[in-house]
Image: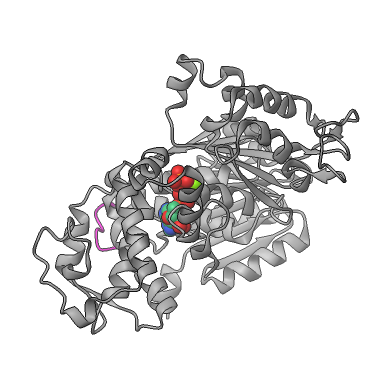
């Protein structure tokens, strides 16, 4: 019993809002932490001096004291305690400043419990790692995900930390990374962990519309703006008011629109097509690109001023081949998900199946792994994912041919497989894929959408 309570991480909360303290103490106790809450600064200091907690969660604006000041004075007394500062007013400057002065993390109110949990888990991992490198057997902290995002590799952990830090701050964010690395997933997470979480998250694919249609889609139009405009229609920006606009594939934005977008970001107003009255706008912009933006700027394909406006904070998603440690957890996650979808039992994973994946370079990144898992679960027999369930070029010819009667696949599945294969061979280049398949780009777009090979809007996996 004693032993047990010793190992329980100790958390102290100090905030002058009774409600906040109560809510946090209640939630964190339920998570299994030894948690004590204080409203009175002096009382809290007494407790902290007696025995330093693992984590101290503290409001910046305390009655009669400044949290950052207090933290600095406390630091020599409790060098091993991770301090998480919370505040009602977030700005990047404050966050950076607080972190420089020794805070482990900085959270803006209102934050989601989920965010705080992730930060605490990260803080405890940090505390354990620095406190005892000798005790190698010590459990490493169980968190290998941040909400829907799975990953335990150092670059992914760093990204979780950035998300928790930047989500509550109302700044524009640019997410870069190869296709299928999880850019949209991160964008959604930024939204969900922000004060805008209850307002809409509206994705807009900047490459999906012909140049003359983009303005109409984004800004909407006034009645009579052009032939056929029978009534005023809201554009995407207007429907996102209060929320977040996700500018996907922003590098594909036509130059003429880039100018207009820059103006919207600067002035926070826009005109509907054919309109004369400016419409006020309150949205946060998150953009994503899988192209080298610096190169595009060098060749004048993208405006530098817009680039700077968008990348106030930059998050770079590493390709899966650079974080192979994430493969097992992702595989288990996807395999379980699809097993549930297909009404099959939770599959076991043969060693050689995982080994083949670990050796693979995943040009299509996590989305490709997801597709491989889906295919393997669909083909698998006896509840085991075997090497024969991998696509041929991955199983290195080891695959035994599947008996003919079991090999019959619905035409749709073959079509999906074929499109995916060509898409992959083209390096996930849509124009190239459409050309190779002899179909138009729009048709390809629809197919990719239908088969969820490139989900541009919603992410069904994360709804589970
Ligand atoms: N770390 C992760 N954990 C769980 N699922 C992930 C992760 N990364 C990506 N996925 C899944 O992989 C698929 C592709 O992710 P996403 O759409 O976010 O990629 P993307 O970077 O936006 O790709 P593209 O550039 O092609 O649009 C999605 O179904 C997403 O849920
Ligand atoms: Mg995307």
Q: Quadrant of residue 429?
A: top left
Q: Any magenta on residue 408?
A: no
Which residue sits at x=24%, y=58%? 136
Picture coordinates of residue 260, whole percent (x, y): 70, 25
Of the pair 39 and 108, the residue shown nearer to us? 108
From what the image shows, is residue 146 above or below residue 433? Answer: below
From what the image shows, is residue 98 above or below residue 381? Answer: above
- Do we see residue 127 in this rendering? no
Picture coordinates of residue 320, whole percent (x, y): 32, 48
Residue lying furthest right: 277
Span highlighted in magenta in the image? 133-138
Which residue sits at x=76%, y=43%? 235
167 sits to left or right of 232 = left
Most prominent secondary structure in the magenta stretch?
Answer: loop
Of the pair 333 and 251, the residue shown nearer to us? 251
- Do we see residue 340 in this rendering? yes
Of the pair 49 and 68, the residue shown nearer to us? 68
Of the pair 86 and 312, the residue shown nearer to us? 312
Quarter of the image containing the N terminus? bottom left
Picture coordinates of residue 301, whole percent (x, y): 51, 20
| Colour mapping used in the image | one colour
From what the image shows, is residue 36 above or below residue 246? Answer: below
Q: Any magenta on residue 137?
A: yes
Q: Quadrant of residue 351?
A: bottom left
Figure label count: 0
Picture coordinates of residue 53, whole percent (x, y): 51, 57
Q: Quadrant of residue 37?
A: bottom right
């Amino acid at each position: 019993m004693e032993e047990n309570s010793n190992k329980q991480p100790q958390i102290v909360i100090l905030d002058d809002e009774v409600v906040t303290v109560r809510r946090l103490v209640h939630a964190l106790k339920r998570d299994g932490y030894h948690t004590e809450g204080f409203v009175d600064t002096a009382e809290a200091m007494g407790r902290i001096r007696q025995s330093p907690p693992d984590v101290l969660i503290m409001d910046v604006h305390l009655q009669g004291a400044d949290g950052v000041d207090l933290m600095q004075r406390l630091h020599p007394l409790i060098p091993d305690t991770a301090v998480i500062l919370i505040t009602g007013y977030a700005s990047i400057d404050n966050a950076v400043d607080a972190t420089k002065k020794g805070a482990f993390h900085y959270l803006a109110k209102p934050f989601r419990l989920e965010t705080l949990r992730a930060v605490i888990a990260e803080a405890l991992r940090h505390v354990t790692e620095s406190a005892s490198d000798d005790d190698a057997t010590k459990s490493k902290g169980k968190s290998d995900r941040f909400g829907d995002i799975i990953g335990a590799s150092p670059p992914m952990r760093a990204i979780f930390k950035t998300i928790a830090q930047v989500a509550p701050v109302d700044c524009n964010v640019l997410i870069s990374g190869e296709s299928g690395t999880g850019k949209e997933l991160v964008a959604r997470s930024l939204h969900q962990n922000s004060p805008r979480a209850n307002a809409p998250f509206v994705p807009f694919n900047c490459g999906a519309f012909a140049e003359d249609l983009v303005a109409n889609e984004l800004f909407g139009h006034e009645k009579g703006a052009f032939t056929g405009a029978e009534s005023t229609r809201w554009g995407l920006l207007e429907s996102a008011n209060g929320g977040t606009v996700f500018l996907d594939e922003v590098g594909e934005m036509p130059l003429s629109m880039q100018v207009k977008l820059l103006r919207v970001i600067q002035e926070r107003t826009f005109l509907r097509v054919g309109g004369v009255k400016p419409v006020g706008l309150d949205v946060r912009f998150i953009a994503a690109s899988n192209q080298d933006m610096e190169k595009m700027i060098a060749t004048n394909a993208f405006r530098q001023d817009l680039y700077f406006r968008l990348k106030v904070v930059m998050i770079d998603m590493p390709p899966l081949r650079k974080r192979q440690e994430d493969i097992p957890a992702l595989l288990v996650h996807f395999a379980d998900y699809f097993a549930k979808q297909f009404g099959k039992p939770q599959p076991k994973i043969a060693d050689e199946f995982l080994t083949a994946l670990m050796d693979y370079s995943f040009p299509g990144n996590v989305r490709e792994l997801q597709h491989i898992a889906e295919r393997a679960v669909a083909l698998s027999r006896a509840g085991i994912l075997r090497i024969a369930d991998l696509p041929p070029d991955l199983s290195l010819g080891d695959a035994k041919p599947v008996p003919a009667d079991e090999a019959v696949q619905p035409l749709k599945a073959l079509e999906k497989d074929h499109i995916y294969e060509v898409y992959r061979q083209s390096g996930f280049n849509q124009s190239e894929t459409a050309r190779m398949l002899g179909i138009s780009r729009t048709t390809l777009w629809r197919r990719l959408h239908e088969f969820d090979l490139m989900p541009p809007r919603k992410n069904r996996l994360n709804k589970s």
